[in-house]
Image (cartoon, rainbow, N blue to C red):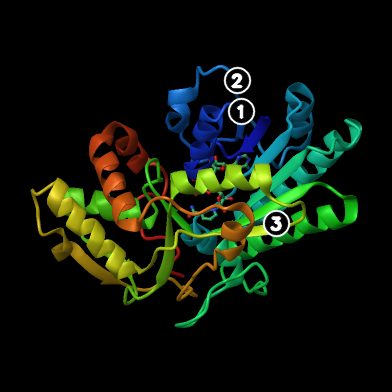
Amino acid sequence: MKILVTGGAGFIGSAVVRQALRAGHEVVNLDVLTYAANLENVASVSNAPGYAFEQADIRDRAALDRIFADHRPDAVMHLAAESHVDRSIDGPGAFIETNITGTYNLLEAARAYWTRAGKPEGFRFHHISTDEVFGSLGEDGQFTEETPYDPRSPYSASKAASDHLVRAWHETYGLPVVMTNCSNNYGPFHFPEKLVPVVILKALSGQPIPVYGDGGNVRDWLYVEDHADALLCVLEKGQLGRSYNIGGENEAKNIDLVRTICAHMDDLHPEGAPHARLITFVADRPGHDRRYAIDPTRIREELGWRPSVTVEEGLRRTVEWYLANEDWWRPLLDRDGVGKRLGNG
Ligand SMILES: NC(=O)c1ccc[n+]([C@@H]2O[C@H](COP(=O)([O-])OP(=O)(O)OC[C@H]3O[C@@H](n4cnc5c(N)ncnc54)[C@H](O)[C@@H]3O)[C@@H](O)[C@H]2O)c1
């Protein structure tokens, strides 16, 4: 397939780009290159046959029309988004514009292209979303694909809105869509404002490791390469109009995750051990969802997909990667807002 990947210079999008090319697909990477983007994430494939890059904004309908006409993709995988909850608290406008209006533009550009092409049966629009649209769980239970939407941050509300648009374009216009809602990702190339790289880099530099609230917030952690694998599986085998929850089968409290990273740091970078002494509890994020958990039954039973990496193994690989790739992360620490406390209301 020739796949148009939006947000392919970001964390998950770049994993999808690398993996899709490895699997023999062609890829057009469409990305406007915000603060969160890095073309180094796709440097390993930038000269690969079948790879093209288009710097464009999904809010720019004319640019999207031109890209569809020039490249004639068989599928769209839509990952471009503003993705950081803390930034959505300080400045929700960009989340509304990119995640909602941008998705609307992309749907309309895809619909126009698909209609002009005679509505080919094999065309797919794959919308990539988050489990955060389902809100916050108590001690028990898991999100299924039938869980009612209950987003509670500007980020998750904007992603929920985009999910609704995609469903509506399927029901109303027959656009052949598949959708996925995924839990927290971690792994190589993760922008250093998100929890896992923050912990690794603070531990490495001997600075306080900030943990929000009491550290008891629970997330289900998925290794990013596993997520990319699941996304390609849903694109190829998912049923039209259907959504699939993707999880890592790795529920952990933030504080336990942070302690595990510190233990890997003690092992792989013994200078400064024990790194857990740097853990510092800080004021919680307003509206911080307490617990997310994914029921992965649908993707497992219908598509035969399961994660391959345990959180222990994935975190170790991730720590090793950051220790070996200072050239990648060091320049990112100077980008706007990185290292500052954002979103504390
Ligand atoms: N990170 C997670 O744990 C997670 C979990 C579930 C779902 N998701 C979803 O997966 C997708 C990718 O997440 P990520 O963590 O890789 O995000 P990211 O912030 O690392 O990357 C987003 C990419 O989108 C690009 N982008 C932003 N606005 C754009 C615009 N207007 N036009 C074109 N490109 C634009 C950025 O330049 C960047 O390269 C998002 O849709 C996110 O909601 C993320």
Q: Compared with residue 175, is residue 5 higher up or lower down, i.e. above or below?
A: above
Between circles 1 and 2, the one closer to the viewer is 1
Q: Nearer the viewer, residue 224 or 156?
A: 224
Identify the amino acid type marked 2.
Gly
The quadrant in which residue 212 appears is bottom left
In the rendered image, is residue 79 in sight? no
Q: Residue 254 location in percent, x, y? A: 34, 67
Measured in 3D between alpha carbons, the distance from the residue under mark 3 to the one under mark 2, in whole angstroms, is 29 Å
Q: Residue 63 location in percent, x, y? A: 74, 31
Instruction: Judge from the rendering whether residue 31 lies leftward or rightward of residue 174; answer left or right.
Output: left
In the rendered image, is residue 139 in sight? yes
In the rendered structure, find residue 50 and report the number of the disc placed on it. 2
Q: Residue 181 location in percent, x, y? A: 60, 59
Label 3 beta carbon less than 8 Å to ligand 1: no
Identify the amino acid type marked 1.
His
Residue under the point 52% across and 67% down: 294
Q: Secondary structure at mark 3?
A: helix
For label 1, the residue is 25
Identify the amino acid type marked 3.
Ser
> How many residues crowd around disc 2 within 10 Å: few (fewer than 14), some, or many (20 or more)?
some
Q: Are marks 1 and 2 in contact (CB under 8 Å)?
A: yes
Q: Nearer the viewer, residue 93 or 105?
A: 105
Quadrant housing the N terminus: top right
Q: Secondary structure at mark 2?
A: loop
For label 3, the residue is 162
